[in-house]
Amino acid sequence: MTIPSDPLFAVEVLRVLVQIAFANDEISPAESVAILGQARARGVSAAEVGRLEAALAGKGPPPAPDLGMLRLHREEVLTLARELAALDGQDEPEGQMVMLLEELLGG
């Protein structure tokens, strides 16, 4: 899974991925490593990485993504969402979130 290099867009993608990861009410280690690793690799601010870490650890609500920005790159976002959903082998709840995301992004 490779998140786009634009830090502003990367933040929004990572935020939506956290939402998808929470679909089954738990975050797998693979999901957490993938999300945080990409956040750091893409130059996301330390404050935002902290918010993502807190959300992934269950210490705060998952941050809301900017759907308007995500709509501009719909297919790329959906591909990344599907890749994340497959990481923990529990496709059902996360797959449903991906379908909802498709609708929210205009599909």
Image: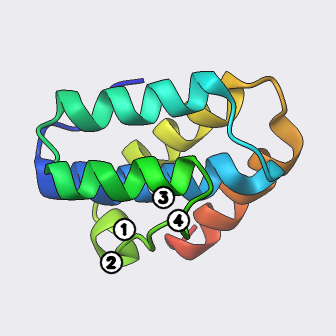
What distance separates the C-alpha of mark 2 from that of mark 3? 12 Å
Residue beneath the point at 70% across and 27% down: 86
Q: Is residue 30 visible?
A: yes
What distance separates the C-alpha of mark 1 from that of mark 2? 5 Å
What distance separates the C-alpha of mark 4 from that of mark 3? 9 Å
Q: Residues within 10 Å of mark 4 (few under 14, many from 20)?
A: many
Residue 87 screen position, x and y as percent: 66, 23
Task: Answer left or right for 16 relative to 48.
Answer: right
Q: Depth check: 78 or 6 in front?
A: 6
Q: Label 4 belongs to which residue?
A: 62
Q: Residues within 10 Å of mark 3 (few under 14, many from 20)?
A: many
Residue 19 screen position, x and y as percent: 59, 59
Q: Residues within 10 Å of mark 2 (few under 14, many from 20)?
A: few
- The quadrant of the image that shows the N terminus is top left
Q: Amino acid at mark 2?
A: Gly
What distance separates the C-alpha of mark 4 from that of mark 1? 19 Å
